[in-house]
Structure formats: C-alpha cells, structure tokens
Amino acid sequence: MSSLTKLLVQNNNLFKSAVLNVQNNYLNEQCIIVDENDKPLRSESKRFCHSAKTLTLHRAFSVFLFTTNHEMILQKRAAQKLTFPSVWTNACCSHPIWNEDEMCTKNNVGIRRAARRKLYHELGIQSVDIDQMKIMGRFLYKAMHDDNWGEHELDYVIILRDCDVRQIRPNPEEVEAVAVVSSMGELTEILKNCEVSFSPWFNLFVRRNFLQNWWHDLDRLDELRNSRTIYRLN
C-alpha cells in the first residue's frame, strides 16, 4: 500500500470516527413521547426512543420535497446512521425536540420549525418558508433495523414544493447522496431493483398509495390533507 493510499485510508477512518461521535451526540436529543392520539406525555432521549429494549412511540416528521417541475428529491442516508444506514428515502426525516419552539401546536408551527431546522442541517437548504409547508396527515408505524435499534413513530408528513435543487448542499454526516426522480413511473422501476434499498416508512407510503396520490395531485394538496385521522401504516 502506497503512502498516499495509507493516508487516504487513515483520513477516511478519522472522518468515519468523527461522524459516529456526532451521531452518538444526537442520541442525547430529547424527543417528544406521545400516545397513539398524539398527546405529549414526557421527554426521553433519542437513544431511549430508538433502542430496541425501550422502543417508545414519539413524534417525528417526514418531508417530501418536490421541484418546480414536480420532480421528487430523495436522499440516501449516511452509512454512519444508527437506523437504516445507506438506504434511500424521502428528502428529510427527523424529530421535533421537546422545547417550546418545536412543541407549539398552533397551525402545527412546532413541526414546521423542526422541519426547517433539519432541512438546513441535512440538506443545507436555507430560508425555508414554513407557511409553504403542507402537512398532509399523521401516520403511525413501527420498524426494526436490527436487534438493537428500531423506529416507532407518529410521523407528520410534510410536502414542500418548488425546491431549487441548486440550493441543496448535503451534509455528509447525515446524507450519503441525493437524487431527483422525475415521475412515479420512474420511482416504481427503481423500487423493482432489488439492489436498491429504501427505508421501511418510505415503502409503506408507497404500498398504501399515499405517495402516489400526493404526487399525482401536487396542485391540489389542500384538498388531500387530513388533519383528523391518524393512519396506521402497519
């Protein structure tokens, strides 16, 4: 192995170690524990919520991002993520934090603020107008990654249109790659490829036809929103 190759490997290992330390720090964030009616109960750490031994229902959000041409933006989760690393999913997925700003329920402004924070953190998208976020509904799902980690979330789906792809600056701590898909037909073909893995929640939105319906009618999202029902995806 040449000296240059050794240096590259060493630097890559240092980067991976630093990223893992960052991911571990995020495990201390305080999530919002809720019941199945979305009533906040208490705060617990992200580690507690996602650990298989203490897997606990908590509030989350999933942002589906579309361009002005109605193309959908996907992200590939970083290899160092503790749950579902290196799988493709919607543009941004995360949690609001147990604090006054992100627990505000009026017009769902707390969830919107959390989504804006993470769109900047993960994708580098600045100046997001939270009033342009369409909250399509709330969804319960549960998925295990392995014997140690899993997901149990009450997920707010947010659709944000007219994204300028040129604004995206992926954070390598969070995002391995970004892709733009032109149509549901193209996505369907990608999903058939057994070599391409998608997150379980993304697959559930496709399997239950929610994503197809939203994508087909991006110009009339207000008519498709449902703020009363909490859907069980599995």
Image (tube, rainbow, N blue to C red):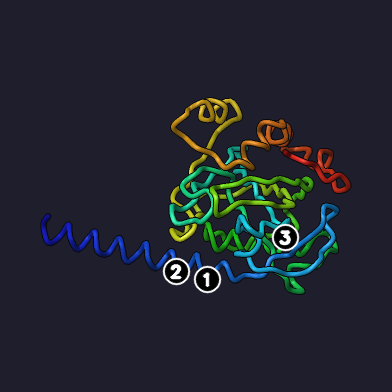
50 on left or right of 194: right
As drawn, 105 above or below 193: below
The mark found on residue 25 in the picture is 1
Task: Say what secondary structure mark 3 lies in.
Answer: helix
Is the C-beta separation of discs 2 and 1 under 8 Å? yes
- Under mark 3, the amino acid is Arg
Q: Residue furthest left?
A: 2
Task: Say what secondary structure mark 2 lies in.
Answer: helix
As drawn, 74 above or below 50: above
Quarter of the C terminus within the rendering: top right
The mark found on residue 112 in the picture is 3
**How many other residues sit within 10 Å of disc 1, few (<14), some (14-19) or many (≥20)?**
few
As drawn, 45 above or below 76: below
On the image, which quarter does residue 72 sit in?
top right
The residue positioned 48% from the left and 54% from the top of the image is 175
The residue positioned 74% from the left and 38% from the top of the image is 219
Task: Say what secondary structure mark 1 lies in.
Answer: helix
| Residue labelled with disc 2 | 21
Cα distance, mark 3 to mark 2? 28 Å
Find residue 7 and report its horizontal and vertical position in percent: 19, 63
**How many other residues sit within 10 Å of disc 2, few (<14), some (14-19) or many (≥20)?**
few
Q: Using the image as rendered, state which of residue 37 and residue 196 is in the foreground.
A: 37
